[in-house]
Amino acid sequence: MLNKVPYPRLALLLTLLTMASFYRSPIAHAGGGPDAVGLVSLSDITSVLKNSDGPLQVGTFTSNATTGEPAANFNGNLPSNYNPNLGAVPGNMGPNALPVQKIDDDSMKQIWVMIRVEANSSDKGDDIAVAPHIDLLIPFNQVVAAEFQSLPLEYFKTSPQVAQSRGATNTTGTVPGDVYAGALFNVVKETQYVPEIKVKLLVKTTTGKDYVDGRFTNAPAYLFEAILGKNVYQNADTFIQRVRLLGQAGFFAWQRQVTGQDDAVTLGAGVEVDMKDGLSATLEVDGYRGWLQGDKPAVLSLSIRKSTTHVDYVLEVDRGLDADAPDWGISFGVVFHADAPTFPL
């Protein structure tokens, strides 16, 4: 139809702008059910105008009112079997796409780098992922620390059933992963009656690819958390030398491609036990709760650490507590550390 209009691009632009005016509006999303009008963003309109070389056609664009994902897209990167009822939420993606952050109760006295390998099993063994991780912390005067988390690549293998449910085109492959960068602030020092309080800011970049196969979001995210730690027992002369209670609470948000943003409240609680001969164990439960379907993962973690003068060895086992989290995870890492220099203020 539009190729018969004297000014087809202008007609399409006006049509899309009219549609975009309803995007995220109360009329478009209030109780609309699975076929509520979700429509488009201005970036989508720009993409259409740039990539339309021949006669232009107007299609029907709908979105799911629960997940907000589009039933059709403009850039042509989604497969023909893409399911609009699935979206960029942890319950519908691989285990490294939107992972739960563990409690970051670092003393901020040492520079350290951790190299570890993690394996995850999700969807009752139908999604297997193996990935190396490289994490770095650089503290300054025990007041603030620069923090980096990186996942260079992920190898994954899924069953055809999981691939079909996600609208994925590949059941196996190796894809680049995400990089996180942020800072850790020591806000309140621990006293006899007051817990230590830190504030953590973390930003996820867009290095993680393969959104089509549900491995990474290929979109930014950010995290803001308050972290609490309080020693409740200390005795250097016993086998158990210290017991420390841990907690965290905050806000996590991530971009869901062209369908807006998902927001979640993060919560976590745990206990750390330090023993003789450099042994320690940490048991914690962490998770976050969003407002959409499939965005409420919770994970129970047990980590065992053996510390030496400059190298630590860490073994961690994770158990997902709901369908939105990976079923199981296991990782082994080596931590290289040294005393952080102090700087005159």
Image (spheres, rainbow, N blue to C red):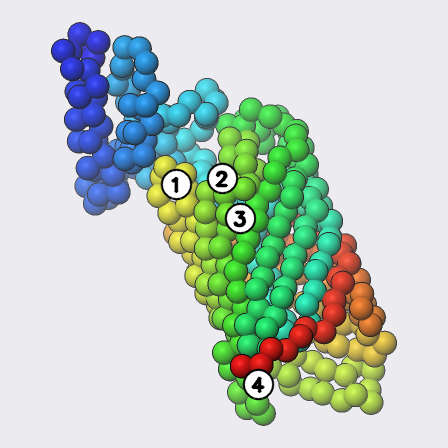
Secondary structure under tag 3 reads loop
Q: Disc 2 residue type?
A: Asn
In the rendered image, which residue does mark 4 sit on? 190
Q: Quick one: label 1 or label 2, which is nearer the N terminus?
A: 1
Question: Residue at (61%, 38%) from the top-left corner?
Answer: 176
The crowding category of the residue bearing disc 2, from other C-alpha atoms within 10 Å (few below 14, some 14 to 19, many at least 20), is many
Q: Quadrant of the N terminus?
A: top left
Select label 1 or label 2 by which is in front. Answer: 2
Vertical arrangement, residue 119 with respect to residue 276, above or below: above
Q: Disc 1 residue type?
A: Thr
Select label 3 or label 2 by which is in front. Answer: 2
| Residue sticking out furthest to the front | 344
Q: Position of residue 213 (x, y in %)?
A: 55, 31
The crowding category of the residue bearing disc 3, from other C-alpha atoms within 10 Å (few below 14, some 14 to 19, many at least 20), is many
Mark 4 touches mark 3? (CB < 8 Å): no
Q: Disc 4 residue type?
A: Glu
Q: Quick one: label 3 or label 1, which is nearer the N terminus?
A: 1
Task: Please say whether residue 178 is visible from this viewpoint.
Answer: yes
Vertical arrangement, residue 127 with respect to residue 73, above or below: below
Mark 3 touches mark 2? (CB < 8 Å): no
Mark 1 touches mark 2? (CB < 8 Å): no
Secondary structure under tag 1 reads loop
In the rendered image, which residue does mark 2 sit on? 218
Q: Quadrant of the C terminus?
A: bottom right
Q: Position of residue 109 (x, y in %)?
A: 66, 75
In the rendered image, which residue does mark 3 sit on? 98
Q: Position of residue 301 (x, y in %)?
A: 66, 60
In the rendered image, which residue does mark 1 sit on? 67
Q: CA distance from mark 4 to mark 2?
A: 39 Å
Secondary structure under tag 2 reads loop
